[in-house]
Amino acid sequence: MKIIFLGPPAVGKGTHAGKVAKGFGIPRISTGEMFREEAKAGTELGKKLNEYMEEGVLVPDEMVIEILRSRLGRDDCREGFILDGFPRTIEQAGALRNITATDLVVNMKASHETIIARISNRLTCRKCQAIYNTLFVKPKIEGVCDKCGGELYQREDQKPDIVKERLEVYERETAPLIDFYRDKGTLIDVSAEGDVEVVHKRITDAINEYIKGM
Ligand code: ADP
Ligand code: ZN
């Protein structure tokens, strides 16, 4: 299966893309995570990527597309993959089509209030990038990752001004992809409201339904 997860920042794409990928035994490919890893490594490319990310603007299409193309060319993608955070522009969607066909787009939806609540209380693990929320998905020990013991921090791009910018960028650049894929008949809408397990079931039910009709 080759699945794209679409949705605004903090809707829960990363969490759910990860769970679904695990279920299918295929990789989850998160461009945001790849970029943060590169930034952490301190390479020239990483420094450039970090500048865009910290401002909450998109990394230029040419850069993203090249990085993605080489990632999708790796062996572990042969049986399929889940894309989380790519494509984010019509340009990227066009490029993706030239790289490989995809089966399905899962469009995660939530109210503006839900998104703001999720994003502004979000903490990320410095070591393994696991995501927590001080309201809904609390770590067992404050400030410490359950999975790896790493330190939790608030990402620069999760501060209020930057969040506002990212939501605007999403509406302007990424939301048009919803109609783009809907017109092709490969898009399913899933409500992202509610607990992680409830949303996960909605997503897997919708995917299974889709597979039956394939
Ligand atoms: P979130 O999951 O919180 O929405 P991501 O981790 O997916 O955020 O992305 C963080 C940042 O990385 C984005 O704000 C953007 O600057 C950059 N980025 C990630 N994916 C892309 C992409 N496909 N195109 C352009 N920029 C991207
Ligand atoms: Zn961790």
Image (tube, rainbow, N blue to C red):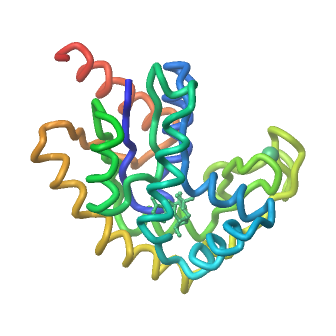
Up/down of 98 relative to 24, above or below: below
Looking at the image, residue 96 sits to the left or right of residue 154; the answer is: left
Residue in the image at 38% along x and 30% along y: 2
- The answer to which quarter of the image holds residue 207 is top left
Residue in the image at 33% along x and 36% along y: 100
Hey, which residue is sitting farthest bottom in the picture?
161
Between residue 157 and residue 58, name the one nearer to us: 58
Q: Position of residue 142 (x, y in %)?
A: 85, 56
Up/down of 38 relative to 204, above or below: below
Between residue 97 and residue 195, name the one nearer to us: 97
Q: Quadrant of the N terminus?
A: top left
Q: Position of residue 175 (x, y in %)?
A: 27, 63
Q: Position of residue 89 (x, y in %)?
A: 32, 63
Q: Position of residue 148 (x, y in %)?
A: 85, 41
- The answer to which quarter of the image holds residue 40 is bottom right
Looking at the image, residue 144 sits to the left or right of residue 76; the answer is: right
Between residue 152 and residue 98, name the one nearer to us: 98
Hey, which residue is sitting farthest top in the picture?
212
Looking at the image, residue 8 sits to the left or right of residue 72; the answer is: left
Residue in the image at 50% along x and 42% along y: 195
- In this rendering, the count of numbered labels is 0
Q: Quadrant of the C terminus?
A: top left
